[in-house]
Image: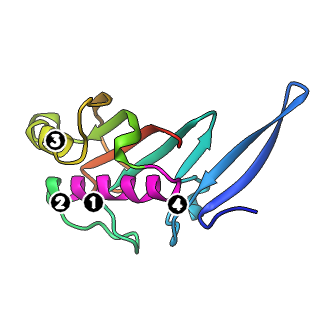
Amino acid sequence: MSTPGVVEAVAEEAGGVRGIQRIATTPDWYEPYRISQAIKAGGLIHVSGQAGIDERGRTVSDDFSAQGRQAFRNVERVLAEAGASLADVVKVGIFVTDMAAALPHVITLREEFLSQPYPADTLLEVSSLAQPEWRIEVEVTALAR
């Protein structure tokens, strides 16, 4: 029996079976796009990129920091659904549309949401994200408890 927000999936693999858990929050704004909010497998939780959108899928603000805070809150919410927290994060990927303007804000966001020992991190500038108004997207890998 699955816990709320966790969908069990089983995949055949080289003569054996391995368990994969799909993690979803309610509402699951990724479902129409055939994307899992997170996958728990092999002792890790892989959280898909989260943007600065609210529970109705609307962008919270045009402000970079407001979008970034919401993106990290969304990551936190998905991790909680998987039974983990930001303290369990071992790797962060941050995608921004304007590195020069974003870097000081990204450092502030890291300090606000992450703690020592800070996780490994990749920060990339991209030409655009899934929606034209999005300025930041955050994905993480965390240890499953």
Q: Is residue 144 above or below residue 67?
A: above
Where disc 4 sits, the SS reads loop
Specify the amino acid type for callout 4.
Tyr
Does label 3 or label 4 sit earlier along the sequence?
4
Mark sitting on residue 30: 4
Observer-nearest residue: 38 or 102?
38
Marks 2 and 3, how far apart in space? 15 Å
Percent x, y of residue 143? 49, 37
Pointer 2: what residue? 66
For the residues bearing labels 2 and 4, Cβ distance under 8 angstroms: no
Pointer 3: what residue? 111
Specify the amino acid type for callout 1.
Gln
Is residue 74 one of those drawn in magenta?
yes
Q: Which residues are magenta?
A: 67-84
Tag 2: Cα neighbours inside 10 Å, few (<14), some, or many (≥20)? some
User: The N terminus is located in which quarter?
Assistant: bottom right
Marks 3 and 4, how far apart in space? 28 Å
- Residue lying at 51% horizontally and 72% vertically, measured from the top left: 27
Observer-nearest residue: 112 or 117?
117
For the residues bearing labels 1 and 2, Cβ distance under 8 angstroms: yes
Specify the amino acid type for callout 2.
Ala
Marks 1 and 3, how far apart in space? 15 Å
Question: Which quarter of the picture shows residue 19?
Answer: top right
Pointer 1: what residue? 70
Where disc 3 sits, the SS reads helix
